Image (cartoon, rainbow, N blue to C red):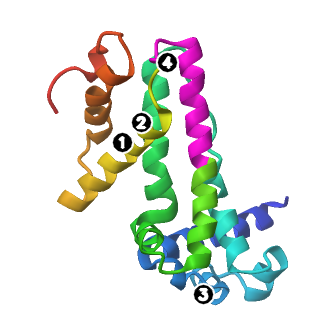
């Protein structure tokens, strides 16, 4: 792929995600993406058949995150899971997209996003299951419930305060740690925030 082509794709992706996050899925049209990205509609249509393909491409990096860099111990693995759970919203669907998903405002969008988020969740679940085999992550935990707890804590914090405090990830990990492992709380998680 040429540098110009990659730059166009990056602009299309950025515009798509900005529209989705700020205005919800109905705002994501090829025309709006073209206007926001500065990429001609004809160029977008050469790459993507329709809005769903544009959304799928834009969300693909979220749906298929790169694996954690550090798997030497449990803490960096769990930090990665929390970061990726948050990134699915902040770096992907956004609060506007999440609201549309929860209200089923756009059934076609809802189906598409559920497929992409399910793929994302499988990747995170696989990392947790691997940690069960290689680290002291309790084998009896339900990984789906752990992921729900992380995302639910994030959405609750956003709803309650309008944002997320700087040390939110650390607080979540400190509170989940005793339920996930018999290891002592790492020094990095100890203390008040």
Q: Which residue is mark 3?
A: 35
- Spatial separation of the CA atoms under disc 2 and disc 1: 5 Å
The reply to whether discs 3 and 1 touch (Cβ–Cβ < 8 Å) is no
Mark 1 or mark 4, earlier in chain: 4
Can you give x and y, in whole percent of width and height, for residue 84 in the image? 49, 43
The reply to whether discs 3 and 4 touch (Cβ–Cβ < 8 Å) is no
Q: Does 184 sit above or below residue 150? A: above
Q: Does 75 sit above or below residue 135? A: below
Please identify, in this view, whether the residue under mark 3 or under mark 1 is nearer the observer. Answer: 1
Q: Which residue is mark 1?
A: 149
Q: Is residue 49 left or right of residue 30?
A: right
Density class for disc 2 (Cα within 10 Å; few <14, some 14-19, many ≥20) is some
Label 3 residue SS: helix
Mark 3 or mark 4, earlier in chain: 3
Please identify, in this view, whether the residue under mark 1 or under mark 4 is nearer the observer. Answer: 4
Label 4 residue SS: loop
Could you tell me which quadrant the N terminus lies in?
Answer: bottom right
Can you give x and y, in whole percent of width and height, for residue 54 in the image? 69, 72
- Spatial separation of the CA atoms under disc 2 and disc 4: 12 Å
Verify whether residue 132 appears in magenta.
yes
Q: Which mark is residue 139?
A: 4
Q: In the rendered picture of this protein, how many numbered marks are placed on residues?
A: 4
The reply to whether discs 2 and 1 touch (Cβ–Cβ < 8 Å) is yes
Q: Which residue is mark 2?
A: 146
Q: Is residue 52 left or right of residue 165?
A: right
- Spatial separation of the CA atoms under disc 3 and disc 1: 38 Å
Density class for disc 3 (Cα within 10 Å; few <14, some 14-19, many ≥20) is some
Please identify, in this view, whether the residue under mark 3 or under mark 4 is nearer the observer. Answer: 4
Q: Does any portion of residue 99 appear in the rendered image?
A: yes
Q: Residue at x 46, y 45 (%)?
A: 85
């Amino acid at each position: 792929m040429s540098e110009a082509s990659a730059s166009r794709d990056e602009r299309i992706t950025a515009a798509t995600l900005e529209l989705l996050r700020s205005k919800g899925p109905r705002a994501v049209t090829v025309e709006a993406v073209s206007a926001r990205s500065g990429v001609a509609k004809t160029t977008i249509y050469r790459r993507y058949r329709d809005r769903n393909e544009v959304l799928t491409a834009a969300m693909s990096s979220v749906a298929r995150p790169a694996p954690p860099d550090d798997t030497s111990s449990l803490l960096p693995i769990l930090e990665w899971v929390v970061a990726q759970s948050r990134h699915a919203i902040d770096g992907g669907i956004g609060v506007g997209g999440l609201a549309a998903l929860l209200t089923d405002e756009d059934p076609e969008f809802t189906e598409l996003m559920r497929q992409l988020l399910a793929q994302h969740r499988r990747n995170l679940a696989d990392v947790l299951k691997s940690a069960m085999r290689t680290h002291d992550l309790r084998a009896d935990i339900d990984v789906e419930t752990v992921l729900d707890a992380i995302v639910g804590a994030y959405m609750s914090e956003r709803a309650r305060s309008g944002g997320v405090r700087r040390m939110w990830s650390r607080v979540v990990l400190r509170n989940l740690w005793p339920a996930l492992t018999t290891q002592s709380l790492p020094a990095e998680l100890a203390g008040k925030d």
